[in-house]
Amino acid sequence: MTDSTAVTWEAPDTDHPARRAARSSMAAVTAGHRGEWLGLFAPDALVEDPVGPSPLDPEGRGHRGHHEIGRFWDAYVGSVREYRFHVRDSFANGPCCANVASIVMTMDGGATMTVDCVIIYTVDESGAITSLRAHWEPDRAMATLIAP
């Protein structure tokens, strides 16, 4: 069961396909539902989290398709014990929605880290996510690491 405080939404909330996909994505992540999360993506979708080269993606090419996106979940998303999303603003137009958010992650052992970011979701005509592009800076996130 998802904690009702796991996602706080203080942003515009008008109905839009990409905004619905973004909210569904956050709900699946906070609930730890890998299959549900993967099911939100088109078969050839691209996840860039973060965009560009980083310790999570040294080549900066992203993760394309369900197999690679599933491996990304297994290595990074699923390794976090708890997520709390705070969406401060949301801009939806065309096939996209850009959310300005902070994500607090609690690791096994109790350490926490906050990622301040802009996440852009793009969907196709059926509402499936074709790309998820998370803009954040790993060094800034690591600077927020708090040991238990």
Image (cartoon, rainbow, N blue to C red):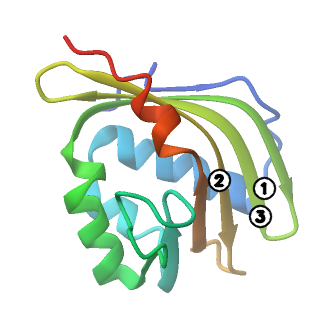
The residue to which callout 1 is attached is 16
Give me the C-alpha separation between circle 3 and circle 2: 11 Å
Look at discs 1 and 3 and give the one toward the viewer.
Answer: 3
Horizontal relation, residue 2 to residue 7: left or right: left
Residue, x 84% and y 47% (percent of image)? 91
Residue, x 49% and y 53% (percent of image)? 25
Q: Are marks 2 and 1 in contact (CB under 8 Å)?
A: yes
> Could you tell me residue 44's position as x and y percent?
49, 88
Give me the C-alpha separation between circle 2 and circle 1: 6 Å
Secondary structure under the numbered disc 1 in the rendered image:
loop
Residue in front for this viewpoint, 23 or 113: 113
> Could you tell me residue 45's position as x and y percent?
51, 81
> Could you tell me residue 32's position as x and y percent?
26, 45
Q: Residues within 10 Å of mark 3 (few under 14, many from 20)?
A: many
Q: Residue furthest left?
A: 109
What's the residue type where badge 2 is placed?
Answer: Arg
What's the residue type where badge 1 is placed?
Answer: His
The residue to which callout 2 is attached is 20
The residue to which callout 3 is attached is 96
